[in-house]
Image (spheres, rainbow, N blue to C red):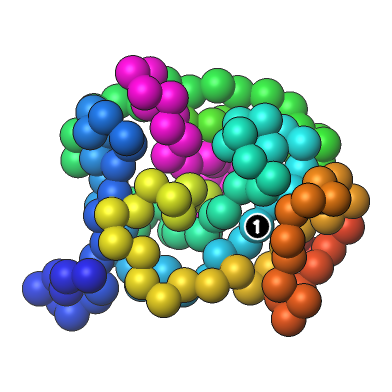
Amino acid sequence: MAETAEGAATMSGGCLCGAIRYRVSERLDRIIACHCTDCQKASGAGASANALVPTEHFTLVQGTPRVFSKIVDSGNLLHRAFCADCGSPIYTRRDHVPEMTVLKVGSLDAPNDMKIAMNIWTRSTRPWMPMDPQAECFEMGRPS
């Protein structure tokens, strides 16, 4: 992890093939695992590992992701950004909170000591998907 001239931590990441690259100018340490069926399908896993980042601290530095938009179980319109070449999920954004970007933490180059702090949409959890019993769990979305 590097630091900006202002002293803020920066992290970088991108897709599997390298076509998409980004920078985050904020320290990330909390992962929210989403177990909804849409995240399972989009990630190809039992859950999507995410970190909330203020959009102003997220910068694409290379490439333009393709975006797939869909109304999800919460009733919100969700925009999933991914690499059109290799399919790697990069981030999501919701229409009603454009000031926040939901970063897919598996796309980080060098994740720090982050850990899962919260599990959401656990009513859809696959029986084979482990969950840390010390993390908060919510049957539906994250509380406001």
Residue at 61% in and 34% down: 44
Left or right: 114 with respect to 1?
right
* Dot 1 alpha-carbon crowd within 10 angstroms: few under 14, some 14 to 19, many 20 or more: many
Which residue position holds label 1? 33
Residue at 67% in and 30% down: 41
Badge 1 amino acid? Ala
Q: Quadrant of residue 2?
A: bottom left
Give percent across and percent down for residue 133: 77, 76
When the figure is inspected, residue 52 is found, relative to residue 78, above or below; the finding is: below
Give percent across and percent down for residue 95: 61, 37
The residue lying toward the viewer, choosing from 24 and 32, is 32
The residue lying toward the viewer, choosing from 64 and 118, is 118
Please state the extent of the stretch shown in magenta in the rendering: 82-100
Residue at 47% in and 41% down: 91
Magenta span contains residue 91: yes
Q: How many marks?
A: 1
Residue at 48% in and 23% down: 67
Report whether residue 28 is seen. yes
